[in-house]
Image: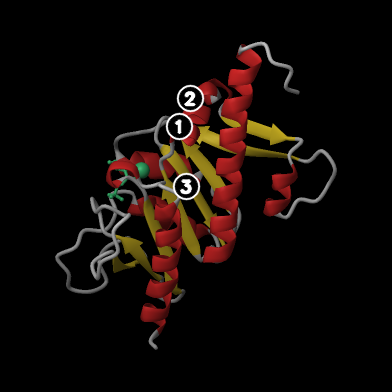
Amino acid sequence: MSLVVQKWNELAEVKAELAARDWFFATSGNLSIKVTNDPLTFLVTASGKDKRKQTDEDFLLVDGDGNPAEDTHLKPSAETLLHVEIYRRTKAGCVLHVHTVDNNLISDVYAQNGEAVFSGQEIIKAFGIWEENAAVRIPIIDNDADIPTLAAKFAKHVDGDTGAVLIHNHGITVWGRDAFEVKKHLEAWEFLFRWQVKRLLLQRAGLPVG
Ligand SMILES: CSCCC(=O)C(=O)COP(=O)(O)O
Ligand SMILES: [Zn+2]
């Protein structure tokens, strides 16, 4: 099996799992997986598709600038430049971007702080952090309609092989060394978002949550 086919299957499996979670509302979301380092190439979802569907046109191979590396009628994701920033700056192997109601709510509630911070949750161990009372923080950036501008703002927060950024009232972009790691981190972030949204509502209702 060629490397591209191998990577295609890996990304298709992650895509199917995120679809089963119903994290691809209204064609939103984009995913990518690195294929080669030198030159940089990666498979990225084709723009505007229903990512819940599995087809032979789900992904296309792009180069280090995010342009198609082969002849195709498919258009790379409109947000491919964000994936480019990650692969150029880190050793990440996979990038996932989803829009969920909870990630949008958290991005809005904490937009003024420029970040959301979570602590006191066992699931934080999914990030490889095992200390007692550890805290994790995720930056929140403005959602700029101009993708090169958005990508430049986003790039300021790309400083490790794993990481995540919330885009205000838009969604989360998470990256990791491989598909397993990034999916685990995405699920952990979404757990924390859902937990916090419910917690805020319970607090509002006067119920005794910590
Ligand atoms: C309908 S969602 C608006 C575009 C977006 O934010 C997204 O994640 C999907 O865009 P793509 O070009 O990757 O399909
Ligand atoms: Zn998006």
Instruction: Report whether 12 appears left or right of 136.
Output: left
Image point (59%, 56%), residue name: 184
Q: Point out the quarter of the image occupied by ligand 1.
A: top left
Image point (55%, 24%), residue name: 110
- Residue bearing mark 3: 173
Could you tell me residue 47's position as x and y percent? 25, 54
Do labels 2 and 1 touch, CB within 8 Å? yes
Give the secondary structure at mark 2: helix
If you read the primary sequence from the N terminus, does the residue marked by circle 1 or circle 3 appear first? 1
Could you tell me residue 209's position as x and y percent? 72, 22
Residue type, mark 2 in image: Asp
- Residue bearing mark 2: 108
If you read the primary sequence from the N terminus, does the residue marked by circle 3 or circle 2 appear first? 2
Choose between 36 and 102: the one closer to the eye.
102
- Residue bearing mark 1: 104
Residue type, mark 1 in image: Asn
Choose between 93 and 87: the one closer to the eye.
93
